[in-house]
Amino acid sequence: MQNTSDEQVLPHHQPSPKKNQDLRRVFSDITDESNEIMIKGRHSLSINPNEAERVECVCCGFIEDCTPAYIFNTRQAHCGEWVCGLCSEAVKEQMSRDSSRKITVGEALGLHMDFCKKFNKTTRVNPKLSLASTMRDIARRSIQYRQGQH
C-alpha cells in the first residue's frame, strides 16, 4: 500500500481514519479472496453451503446427496474419506467389536473397505456361486467340529 501525499504516518502514532478504512477494505478483500481460494481448492465444496452435492461412499459405492458441511464433517471423522451412514455404523461396530485390542478409525475403515470389496467381487457378481461357497464353508466347519468332538 502506498502513502498518498494527504496522509501522514508518524512513528508511534495511530494512523489517520482514512488510512484505517483502507486497511479494513484491504483486509476484507483478502478475506473474500481467501474464501474463494478455499472453495476452489476443495472441489467438493460449492459456493452455497446449503446446496446438496453428490458424493460416493468409498466403501460400498453408494451415491448420496449431502451438504458440504456434512461431507466435511464425515471426512474429518473417517480419515479424509467419505463413507455413507451404513458404512459409518459398520466402522463404529468394527472398532467396538474387540474390546481387548483397540483399533483406530483408519484400521476399522480399512477392514470394512476390504469386506465391501470382497462382497462386491463375489456376492453381487454371482449370488448363486456365493451361496454355494458359503454352504461349503458351513459344511467344512461342521466336519471340523465333529472331528474335534470325537
Image (spheres, helix red, strand yellow):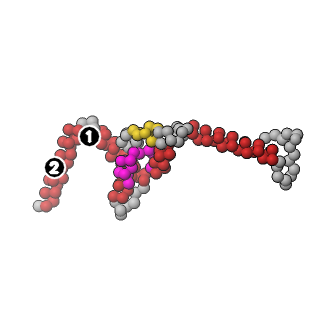
Q: At x 37% / y 51%, what residue is drawn? A: 89
Is residue 102 in view from this perspective? yes
Residue 65 percent across, percent down from the top left:
43, 39
Tell me which corner region of the image, top left, top right, bottom left or bottom right, holds residue 145. bottom left
The amino acid sitting under disc 2 is Ala
Q: At x 27% / y 36%, what residue is drawn? A: 125
Question: Residue 13's mark?
Answer: none
Can you identify the residue that label 2 sits on? 139
Tell me which corner region of the image, top left, top right, bottom left or bottom right, holds residue 19. top right
Is residue 75 in view from this perspective? no
Q: At x 34% / y 42%, what residue is drawn? A: 117
Q: Which residues are magenta?
A: 78-92
| Mark found first going from the N terminus, 1 or 2 | 1
Q: Check residue 91 for magenta coloring.
A: yes
Asked whether the residues under the numbered discs 1 and 2 touch, taking CB atoms below 8 Å apart as contact, a structural biologist would say: no
**How many C-alpha atoms fall within 10 Å of the one at disc 2: few (<14), some, or many (≥20)?**
few
Q: Circle 1 sits in a helix, a strand or a loop, which is it?
A: loop
Q: Nearer the viewer, residue 125 or 140?
A: 125
The N terminus sits in image quarter = top right
Residue 38 percent across, percent down from the top left:
59, 41
Furthest residue in direction left, as rendered: 150
Is 150 above or below relative to 78?
below
The C terminus sits in image quarter = bottom left
Question: Residue 123's mark?
Answer: 1
Q: Circle 2 sits in a helix, a strand or a loop, which is it?
A: helix
Residue 31 percent across, percent down from the top left:
66, 43
Measure the alpha-carbon separation of dots 1 and 2.
19 Å
Q: Which dot, 1 or 2, sits closer to the camera?
A: 1
